[in-house]
Image: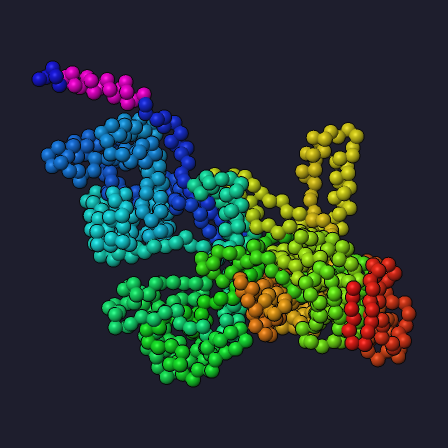
Amino acid sequence: MAAAGILMFIAATLYIFLVLVPDLPPIDNLQDAEFQVPLRIYDKNEFLLAEYGEHRRIPLEYEDIPKKIEHAFLAAEDDGFWEHGGVDPLALMAAVYELVTTGSKTRGGSTITMQVARNFFLTKEKTYTRKLNEILLALKIERDLDKETILELYLNKIYLGNRAYGVVAAAQVYYGKTLEDLSVAQAAMIAGLPKAPSRYNPIINPERALIRRDHIIRRMEQLGHITEEQYQIARAEPVTAELHRPSVSADARYVTEMVRADVFNTYGREVYGSGLNVYTTIDDRLQTSANQSLRKALLDYDRRHGYRGIAGHIDLEQVKTDPFDDELVAEERIGNLRKAVVMAVEEDRIQALLPDYQNVEVMFAEAMEWARPYIDENQLGPAPKQPADIVQPGDIVWLEQKEDTWWLASVPDVEGAIVSLDPSSGAILALVGGFDYFHNKFNRASQAKRQPGSNFKPFIYSAALEKGFTSASIINDAPVVFDDDSLEATWRPENYSGRFYGPTRLREALVKSRNLVSIRVLQSLGLRYATRYVERFGMNRSDMPYDLSLALGSGAFSPLEIVRGYAVFANGGFLVTPYYINRIDSSEGEVIFEHQPLTVCQGCETEQEQTQDAATQTATTSAEQAEEALVDVPQYAPRVISEQNAYIMRSILREVVQRGTAVRAKALGRSDIGGKTGTTNDQKDAWFSGFNDQVVTTTWVGFDDQKPLGSRETGGRAALPMWINYMQDALLGTPVNLEEQPEDMVTVRIDAATGERANENTANSRFEIFRLGLEPQEQSSGLAGTDVEVPAGGSQGARLIEEDIAEEIF
């Protein structure tokens, strides 16, 4: 019998050393192990915006582990950790004995070192061979690594439920705290999770978790890690764990999804676990303002068009404790709206219950009296006289909190977008693509191609200035009829007001957004010239119709494309490229990508050309040396329109704010802002784009299915308020800056009626700016001009056939 035992021992030993040991994985790189850490996206001030990845993990070093965490895990998992050599023989024998005698295994025999071996190198299969490998690996790890490193690896690697890997992530997930801020009881609760992350999860199984926690606290006291008094305090602490999502500084899901897609396309799927940190151009303060401004604009629009009804109804008699806990109502948030249940309807208010057991009052005055029934975009039902005309007990409604009051609301069907740039570099400061990303992920700021309407006109007027028009050129605002093969039918465009204003200066036409003048200007320029010119602003000719409706913005562009075009006016004539990633760091902090934007530099074009010439034309410079030299040459955004053109356009667009279609923006109290409204046929799209020299922003409002917004829902009413609210924050604390007039420009007093130079007899005059050589030379005769005052060579052969009532252009 003894001989048989000796033979079995020898066979087992040979099996271990000849079969198992040679197959053990090397642990040389264990000390440099790379943990799966999610992709994190930050704003420009390094505040967290989003996190992408299956594993939530924040690795830390042993020196940064609080003692209460260390003591809690050692008490729970391996109180002999500092004494054993990787394996606890007594614990193993106890586990084997239990298995042999009872047929079940409830006692754990694995040390922390064995768990490190299993977590890093082995599968989850439960076999005797795997257990032997685990033991052998643990002995090998203990031989090669110190105890502190082993514990650090364990506390960073261990799975603790709810996608939390490692103790730092667990502290954030369950308590929203750092490790240092955890109480002893909370540390013990987390330490109880490795044994069974689901069974002892304090969120889904608080009773079992409490038993496990109290056992660990007792062990901590028995091992001398805490005093009796600390034990009593910790044991009396209630279970406070709840699920905490990553704390982000601003809702930026539309833009962070753009970032995530770009990083994924560049680095592949491993980005979700490689711990990349992406630092964006987004300003969290402005991003928050952009969200608030967009949601306010859409909710204001929605209320102007009436209440579209309740979200549902439940029988309050079926409610046992709480309609949300009883799963009669799904807990939801969309944007800044919260779902609630009407519990009582009174004469002047309603009582409603929110998902967090919060009872709120909604007063009828203001907060509900707006809720006339929605009929269509132009019709409302009768005004309610009391809350009972709108809701009944048991109705499920949406509520909006405005400071300390609650307002009845609907989730808007209408959508919107806002995008804001730094015009000197193209850095995106804020971007919102809809009311709520999780409600509808379509990014209207970058993906929606919509007609810009009059928001497009400044590009045509800039082309006119380049072609030889001046801001004093006279164009006849009179009825026109177009028979054009490129159009499906005879086209009779009108001004928004339906009126005609006769001879009009070009400046006045843009300030007042006169459609007929814009069409005549484009017809005079010629479509070929105009479409090519607009390409200078970064727009594609394929998005522009090749007919005269282009003058009224019948092309299709995204808000991001439009705001890029307006940046050219804001920065003095340079085309910048919008971007949102500043740099990308590896998990070790190494910069692996850094964006070098083409920035605006007034007067630097010549300097850049000279530097490039010096680098590339020197006879002794090789091609490789020239290329290396150019790396250090500052790269500037290309100039696409002259500074004189940009200066005149800015002055006109500022006048749009002072006395034109965007006069509401005067509320900002600034003289350096300019912009243009935009409204399309049937009011399907409402726009506003505006700027100063520091910020350029475009806002858009419309329906995804291109339904009409309703009469009077122009850019100035639907989109401009969003822009005003945002720019109030964006320009806070920034100085008013009016740039100097460029060289080769003159200011002349003109006759406001004719655009000609004024004299002492001119009754109505104003100052106008001109490019040198294009200023009017003849004094005013008091007579109105012809249809178009165009310098020689500027008409491109336009045929204007004037009649008393209308004109036909063939």
Provide residue 643's location: percent of width, then percent of height: 76, 56
The residue nearer to you, when weighing 327 against 297, is 327
* Quarter of the view holding residue 33: top left
- Quarter of the picture containing the C terminus is bottom right
| Residue at x 57% of width, y 55% of height | 446
Does the magenta-highlighted stretch encompass residue 9?
yes
Provide residue 459's location: percent of width, then percent of height: 71, 60
Structure colour scheme: rainbow
| Residue at x 34% of width, y 30% of height | 145
Left or right side of 380 for 466: right
Left or right side of 680 for 81: left
Left or right side of 594 for 175: left
In terms of secondary structure, what is the magenta stretch mainly? helix
What residue occupies the far left of the structure in this picture?
1
Reply above or below: 632 against 455. Answer: above
The residue nearer to you, when weighing 445 against 430, is 445
Report the span colored magenta: 6-22
| Residue at x 35% of width, y 51% of height | 173
| Residue at x 82% of width, y 71% of height | 802
Reply above or below: 334 against 78. Answer: below
